Image (spheres, rainbow, N blue to C red):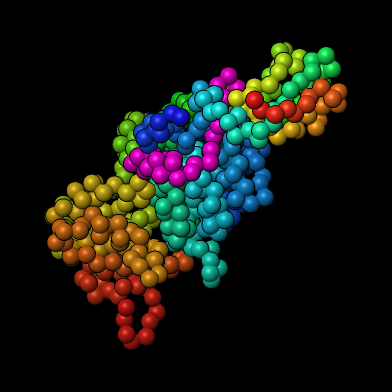
Amino acid sequence: MPELELLTGGEAVAHAMRQVDPDVVPVYPITPQTPIIQGFAKFVADGKAHGELVDVESEHSAMSAAIGSALAGARTMTATSSQGLALMAEVVYIAAAMRAPIVMALGNRALSGPINIHCDHSDSMLIRDSGVVQLFVENAQEAYDMTVLAPRLAERPDVLLPVLVCQDGFTITHSAEPVELLADAAVRRFVGDYEVPHALLDLAEPATQGPFAMPDYYFELRRAQVAALEAALPAFRDVSVELARLTGRPLTTVERYRLDGAHTVVVALGSTAGTVKEGVDLLREEGERVGLLRIVSFRPFPHRAVARALGSARSVVVLDRADSPGGAPPLYAEVASVLYGSGADLRGHVYGLGGRELHPEDLREIVSGEAPAYVGLRSDACPV
Amino acid sequence: MAALRTWQQLEPGGAVVRAEAERVRTGGWRTGLRPEADLTRCVDCLLCWLYCPDSAVVLDGTAFAGFDLDVCKGCELCAEMCPAGAIEMVADA
């Protein structure tokens, strides 16, 4: 029997980082990511991880240093949340454009304002179009597994992009669960050596990274980035098959939960999927034909897998933990583009902003169509 | 000038590798003046090599060996820095 440890999502990711043993970790603390980097810093201080932990002065600097070290030829990881990601955003776009395979743990937290420390996905959505891979996990075990997988995905020669492992702030980062860790040696073997093309420290073959691109090349370079992000879907499948041989827990770009014969399918990201599964079980017991489609890979968005999973649904309900004021919420917009022309009934709800709880029983009204557009919101008589 | 490449032909992130960089002949942008060295006065201090922003100073080991006019832009820094008065800017032919 594998040994289980009681770990929070943050601690589980710190263990994954210790086992991956990156060469460089430039990082700045921010709630709710702090336990990740605090845990990893302790491993470094205790000699259990051997990389260079760089105490930078801001997240902007963290990502800047990460680009330099990743392109120099050093395996690089970092972590942040919310305002940290907002401050880092400028450089996140550059990291993707420079094709720097940095792995970042993100503890999802609402963006200010008002200032708040709890979970929603507005920070992830802020950098939705930056060209980075964003993988949303459901629990601490998956946060661990995904952090072990992430370097291999990021460093694939056809991908070479930053990979964000997104875990819901507090709900996952601070909640203790039984987690099964792989043996240190197994993780080291799985991640292997770090290689990038044209490493800056390869003095025998010097190269210029991040050159100025005028109208004659900017468009081509952006298109190449799109192809790299799209390549991350098949790459994810390859790498996850390999990892599943070690863990016995296959990771997929979408998870289908009780979709067989489901008339109504709820679509959600992150830890909320656990809540929705409870709700689906409740409703199934009451005879409702309902299921859940959990999106793991939000970027790249697995359009084909989603289309297949939603193929026979009569109605689809999308739960967004981020809003797009004046427009369609991000997950809703994505699912709507998949379902365009399918004839399926599509509804969307925004829930859980700033850490507002969603409960399994809330699913009853969400599925029946009686829930307002903003679920869990205190509101005067006029709904919506 | 080489034909513009398609998006599939680019290095990841648009990295410029050595073979490619060597094809770039920025000397065509020169100001109209080029440096000329008087080797009888040169003391091989290599200040010109150190200061040249375009790596246009060619060395033979640790000795000054001339200028690579394919990349020299005629900025005159080498002539300004030379403590031996061995570099003079002359009109480009």
For image coordinates 30% across by 61% down, the residue present is: A332
**Quarter of the rendering occupied by the N terminus of chain A:** top left
Would residue A373 appear left or right of A172 to someone viewing this image?
Answer: left
Observer-nearest of B25 and A214? B25
What span is in magenta? Answer: A203-230
* Residue A141 picture location, percent across and down: 41, 45
Is B42 located above or below residue A111 in the figure? above
> In which image quadrant can residue A233 be found?
top left
User: Would residue A228 be seen by someone viewing this image from the given angle?
Assistant: no
Q: Furthest-bottom residue in view? A: A381
* Residue A304 picture location, percent across and down: 23, 46
User: Would residue A86 be seen by someone viewing this image from the given angle?
Assistant: yes
* Residue A286 picture location, percent across and down: 18, 65
Observer-nearest of A131 and A273? A131
For image coordinates 26% across by 54% down, the residue present is: A293
For image coordinates 64% across by 22% down, the residue present is: B68
Would residue A198 appear left or right of A249 to someone viewing this image?
Answer: right
Is B89 located above or below residue A258 in the figure? above
Would residue A109 appear left or right of A308 to someone viewing this image?
Answer: right
- Total residue callouts: 0
> In which image quadrant can residue A78 be found?
top right
**Quarter of the rendering occupied by the C terminus of chain A:** bottom left
Observer-nearest of A283 and A155? A155
Q: Furthest-right residue in view? A: B84
Observer-nearest of B3 and A232? B3
Residue A221 drawn in magenta: yes
Residue B4 drawn in magenta: no
* Residue A66 picture location, percent across and down: 57, 40
For image coordinates 36% across by 35% down, the residue present is: B6
